[in-house]
Structures are given as C-alpha cells and as structure tokens.
Amino acid sequence: MNLTGKIAIVTGASSGIGAEFSRALTGKGATVYGLARRESKLEAIRKELGDLFRPVVADITDPGSIQDWITSTFTDGLLPDILINNAGTGYFNKVEDLPLDEWHTMINTNLSGVFYITKYIVPLMKKNPAVCHIINISSIAGLIGNPSISGYNATKFGVRGFSEALMKELRYDGIKVSCMFPGSIATEFFDNTGTDIHPNMMMGRDVATVLTNLLELPDNFLIDEVTMRPLNPKPPDKPL
Ligand SMILES: NC(=O)c1ccc[n+]([C@@H]2O[C@H](COP(=O)([O-])OP(=O)(O)OC[C@H]3O[C@@H](n4cnc5c(N)ncnc54)[C@H](OP(=O)(O)O)[C@@H]3O)[C@@H](O)[C@H]2O)c1
C-alpha cells in the first residue's frame, strides 16, 4: 500500500505509540483520524502534525458514540483504508487483589473496544475497492502468561484470537489483518502498573517504523503476526 492519500483511524492517538503511529502515517501523507478521550493532548498533536491529523474525542468503550462517529464521518466517497486498534490499558496485580473495576476497564477497552470499532469499520472496508489493513496491538502478554498480569494477559490473548480469526474471515474481502506483539515500550502505559520506564525499553518511533513497513508491503503480501522485543530488556543499572 502506498500510504499517500490513505485514510487511517488510530485509536489511542493521544499518547505513546498511538501518537507515534500518527506521526509516522501523516509523515507518509496519510490522513489520520486519531481517537482518544483527552482532548488537550489530541489538540497538541494536531498543532504538531497539521491538518492531516484529525482529532476525534471518543471513548472506545461506548459502542453507540463510536457508531455515531463512524456513520457521521464516512460515506461511499470517503472510506477508511487503515484501522489501527491501539488504545489499551493495563493494571497489574495478583488475581485476588485485582479490583473488579480494573478488570472491567481492561476488558472494556482492550477487548470490547477493539470489537466495537472493528464491527462498524469492516462493512466500510468491504465497500472500499482498494486493499485495506487492520492492525491490532496485542503484546508479548498476548503470547505468554505471567504472574500478577493475568487480567491483562486475558485481554491480550483475546486480541490474538480475534485477530487470527478475522485474518481468515476477511482475507478474501481484500482486507488484511495483522497483530503486533510488542515487549516493553517506554510510554505512559506503565503509569498504572507501578513499573518504572527505563532506557532499554523500546522506543515508540521504532515500533511505528515496523507498523508503516507492514502497511507498505505489496497488496498480496501479508505479515499476520509480528513479535518485537528489546535485545536487552533489563534496566541499564541492573546486573545481567
Ligand atoms: N508500553 C508497552 O510496553 C506496551 C507493550 C505492549 C503492548 N502495549 C499496548 O500498546 C497500546 C498503546 O499503549 P501505550 O504503551 O502507547 O500507552 P499509553 O501512552 O498509555 O497509550 C494508551 C492510549 O489509549 C488511549 N485510551 C485508553 N483508554 C481509552 C478509551 N476508553 N477510549 C479511547 N482511547 C483510550 C489513551 O488515550 P486517552 O487516555 O486520552 O483516552 C492513550 O492514547 C495498548 O494497547 C497497550 O496495551 C504497550
């Protein structure tokens, strides 16, 4: 796909890798509808990136408002080419200590939110004569379970299953589905988790380079899963 002139939707565009995806995509000439709840952060990104970045204040856990935004934005003359399901959140705790509201927030955001927007965007992509691409952001935690992250693991394993099934369901409609499984990236994600970020975590801009590389492959060439990790994941001041 040549990204110039393409129409992309990026959820979780207000910070972290969603903001980096928006930078990379607009840098290649795509228009990005960037969804998130924090208006001031989205507005700052619009100021930085210009009119190719369209801020959309939206909560992906609210299916009615997501459907309303999609029906009021897209028409047969303006169809989405790219959907990046990136918005997500993590709370880490032992199973007996994980509060119910944190479990529900993870399920509603990481899993139901991905389902809602995908459900309403796929019919538009089926109308699009060009090859389209959905990229879902899971995590290494979507491949490997670990103590104290069982709730987050459950959502990210779910994203993997959803992605694999969709890849098989949509391939003959000219819609690619890929799933990315990143290890630790230095972002605000860790604010909720009690983990400090450090310089050996991956940088969002490098993850964004992988994303645009996936999108730019030839139409009949699909990479469905990508795992990425820091070479040395330990903080620089910790002994190996
Ligand atoms: N950082 C890592 O190490 C890492 C590793 C693997 C996978 N991931 C995944 O990468 C994705 C992005 O995370 P990040 O690291 O970039 O963290 P981040 O900086 O905390 O970004 C999360 C984004 O999701 C948005 N968001 C959260 N809930 C939302 C909702 N209900 N509706 C709309 N937007 C919502 C946030 O925006 P608002 O708060 O403005 O709504 C923010 O833009 C997540 O799915 C995360 O699970 C992260």
Image: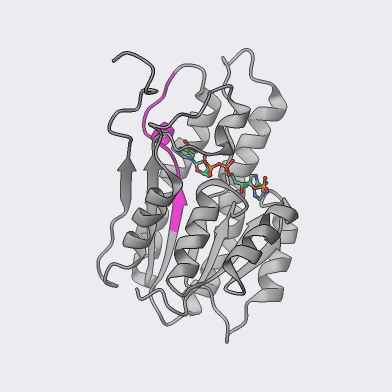
Task: Choose between 114 and 211: the one closer to the eye.
Answer: 211
Q: Is residue 138 magenta?
A: yes
Identity of the residue drawn at 51% across and 23% down: 149
Residue 65 locus on image (x, y percent): 74, 60
Rendered image quadrant of residue 232: top left
Residue 130 lies left or right of residue 39; in this view the side is left
Q: Quadrant of the C terminus?
A: top left
Q: Which residues are magenta?
A: 135-146
Q: Tell me the residue at 42%/56% (across/down).
A: 166
215 or 55, nearer to the observer: 55
Q: Is residue 220 left or right of residue 189?
A: left
Number of callouts: 0
Q: Nearer the viewer, residue 170 or 59?
A: 59
Using the image, determine if residue 123 lies above or below residue 44. Answer: below
Assign the N terminus to one quadrant of the image.
bottom left
Tell me the quarter of the picture where residue 135 sits. Answer: bottom left
Compared across the picture, whether 126 is left or right of 192 comes to: left
Residue 45: x percent and y percent?
A: 62, 60
Q: Nearer the viewer, residue 176 or 33?
A: 33
Please determine whether, in this image, residue 199 is positioned above or below residue 110.
Answer: above
